[in-house]
Structures are given as structure tokens and as C-alpha cells.
Image: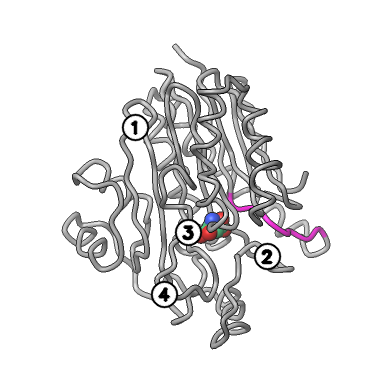
Amino acid sequence: MSTIAIAVHGGAGTISKEQMTPERESAYRAALEHALRRGHEVLKEGGAAIDAVEAAVRVLEDSPLFNAGRGSVFNADGQHEMDASLMNGADLRAGAVAGVQNVKNPIGLARRVMDHSEHVLISGMGAFEFAHKHKVELEDDQYFHDDFRYQQWKEVAGTDVVQLDHSDKERKFGTVGAVALDMNGHLAAATSTGGMTNKKWQRVGDSPIIGAGTYANDATCAVSCTGHGESFIRAVAAHDVHALVAYKGLSLAEAVRVVVHDKLPPLDGDGGLIAIDREGSIVLDFNCPGMYRGHVGGDGVFHTAIFR
Ligand code: ASP
């Protein structure tokens, strides 16, 4: 039997210490721990890593603090378009959705794509119809409305500025994700996001792209990314961590270091990622001032952190 372990992130970026009041910090840390506990319960009961990462991400999607699900940022039309994906390391099955609207938990929809369709990635209205068909819970626009995010969008609405949720000097970061190892030695990863503020043309980032924002393979590791999506796509970041472990024999920590600190910065790839391997080693690394993150390993001790 494997040791069980799970890690989560809630986005990475310029998180300013000055603006982080003790109340806000504890709200973020409580939300991260809540997500970790939910995923950890699944693992403790003998559940699969894929169920644990889905459960953890759902908690983060339901929190208005993070740019995913309920807290998603506004696009150029003042709407919310969400992306999500997950991958099962045991058999390399994966499911993803891009540009979905009014779906309460995009990660749940991605799961249904994986389990109940012959596809990996579906998008837009087609994904909405699929959600209807599978009786996925929907919410009206008001559910996704957050005053802070609305102001954030208003500042750039009507311009060509597309803003990474993290790049704001104040609050609001980010995309969410989870990686886990279950008792049977299986790995899984999940990522969910509202993308970038004021995005247009149905822009899709790395989060729903298998290999870019999310990757899991029992042979090596499971990875969930957050950051400047275009760069993570060009770096094929999540898969690159796997490749460095698989083909170059690097340790997980070294593979993550190479991707986060050597390969992404020349591509303007601000951000970070969380990763876990078959031994239950967890690596949470980022190349910007902070990343909302948490993990619990074999010792059962819960950790959460924001800054370095
Ligand atoms: N990677 C996400 C995207 O580009 C954004 C983020 O991580 O906050 O859509």
C-alpha cells in the first residue's frame, strides 16, 4: 500500500505582503486547508487519486477567493468563461472543458467528459449542451458576480489590456489545482480557472490543455500549473516535468526547478506549479513572489503557505 498525499494551489503571482491583512491571509489559508482536507478524506477512505483531486478542486471552485468557478474573472464581454481539466495517471485518461459558462463546477464537467464521452476536450456551447445532457449543476450569472472582480474588469474594459489574474497589485489570484497519490499508488492532477481578465476571442489558456496546465502519469508524476497560460502552453510545462523525470532520470524537485526557473522565464512564463510523484514526494515551486498552496503527506500534517 502506498502512502497517501495531496497538494493544492490557488494561483501564483505578485501577491503583495502589504495588502495581505491577517484576516485575508487566514481566509485564503482556511480555504486551501478545507480543499486539502476534502481531498485527503477521499484518499484516507481508500478512494482514487482522481476522485481526491476533483473533490479538492470543487471546494476551491466554490470559494469566491479564487479565479475558478464562482470567483472567475470577467472576460471582455463582462461574462465568465471557464476552463478545466483533469488526468488519471493510471491509464492516461483525461477530460477537459474550455470556455464554458454558467457551469457551477467546471472540473465536474471535465470529469464527465473523461468518463462519459469519447473525447478529451470540448468547448463553448457544445460543452454547455453536454453539461445539460449530463444534468451538471448550473448557476445563473449572478452566482459568478464578484464586486472586486467586476471593478478589476471595469478598469480595463473596452481596452486591449488582457490581465493575468495574478498580475494585479492587490488581491485576487488565481487558478486552482490539485495533485494526489492514492493508496494504490495511482496519481492524478486537476486544474480549473476563469482565465485572464478581459480576455477576448474565446481565448483559452493552459489550464484545459493536457500536457500544458495539467498532466499525470503513474510512471512519473502528476502536475498542475498556474501562471501565464500562453507561456505554459509553449513550454508544454506539465508534460515537460514528466519528460525530465521519465527520460532524463531527474528527481521530481530537479525537474520542477528546471521547468519553473530555467525554461519558463525566457518565455515570460510567470507562475508556478505543484507536483507529486509515486513515492509521495511533493514539490510546490514558483518563479514569482507568491503562490497560494498547501499539502499533506504521509505524516498527515496539513501545511498551507502563500509567500516563500
Ligand atoms: N494559467 C491560467 C490561464 O492562463 C491563468 C492562471 O493561472 O491564473 O488561463
Mark 4 burial class by Cα count in 10 Å: few <14, some 14-19, many 20+: few
Give the residue pinned by disc 3. 205
Q: Which residue is mark 2?
A: 167
Magenta part of the chain: 10-17
Q: Which residue is mark 1?
A: 92
Label 2 vs 3, first from the N-terminus: 2
Judged by depth in the image, the label closer to the viewer, 2 or 4, is 4
C-alpha separation, residue under disc 3 versus residue under disc 1: 21 Å
**Which amino acid type is shown beneath numbered disc 3?**
Gly
Inspect this view and state whether residue 66 appears. no
**Image quadrant in which you'd find residue 297:** top right
Amino acid at the residue labelled 4: Trp
Which one is in front, 285 or 34?
Answer: 285
* Quarter of the rendering occupied by the N terminus: top left
Residue drawn at 34 percent across, 64 percent down: 100
Q: Compute the Cα span from label 2 to label 4.
A: 21 Å
Q: Is the residue marked by circle 2 packed among few (<14), some (14-19), or many (20+) residues within 10 Å? A: some
Measuring 42% from the left and 24% from the top, which residue is drawn there?
218
